[in-house]
Amino acid sequence: MENVATNIEMLFEKAQDYTKTSIDLLKLNAIDKTADIAASLTFRLALGLIVAMFSLFINIGISLYIGKLIGEYYLGFLIVSGFYLLLGILLILFRDRFIKIPITNLIIKKLLETKIR
């Protein structure tokens, strides 16, 4: 009878250890996924900032060039601003296709990605 009780105690301890280890593994996997998503989004934001700065300066140059061709610099800026207004309206109309869906897919892909080490 003592042998059965000892076996049950050992089984209970092993089950308890397994549960603790499984919880720790889940925590570590969650941390890994969160860090991976944060790093990916940070990279994309940094790249977006660089592209935005490049775009800003190129657009100033284009505006000045168009203004010089037309004869009034402010008209060059108005033409470029009108182009971006049109682009902004199109982006609002198609925001699901160009913003929401790609970001959602990126996060889901990162969450479901398995690492091979």
Image (cartoon, helix red, strand yellow):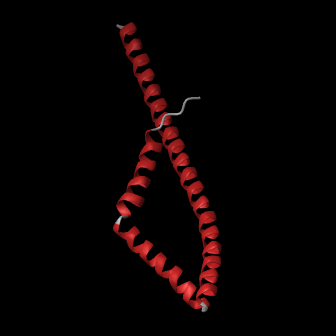
Residue 5 at x, y percent in the picture:
37, 13
Which image quarter holds the C terminus?
top right
Q: Is residue 63 above or below residue 46?
A: below
The residue at 55%/89% (across/down) is 75
Q: Quadrant of residue 96?
A: bottom left
Residue 68 at x, y percent in the picture:
64, 86
Residue 54 at x, y percent in the picture:
64, 68
Left or right, 72 with reference to 104: right
Which image quarter holds the N terminus?
top left
Q: Is residue 6 above or below residue 28?
A: above
Residue 19 at x, y percent in the picture:
43, 30
Question: In the depicted view, which residue is nearer to us: 71 or 3?
Answer: 71
Question: In the depicted view, which residue is nearer to us: 30 or 10?
Answer: 30
Q: Is residue 32 above or below residue 52?
A: above
Question: In the depicted view, which residue is nearer to us: 80 or 30?
Answer: 80
Question: In the depicted view, which residue is nearer to us: 36 or 73?
Answer: 73
The residue at 55%/50% (across/down) is 40
Left or right, 97 with reference to 30: left
Q: Is residue 61 above or below residue 37?
A: below
Q: Quadrant of residue 49?
A: bottom right
Left or right, 56 with reference to 105: right
The residue at 59%/68% (across/down) is 52
The residue at 58%/88% (across/down) is 70
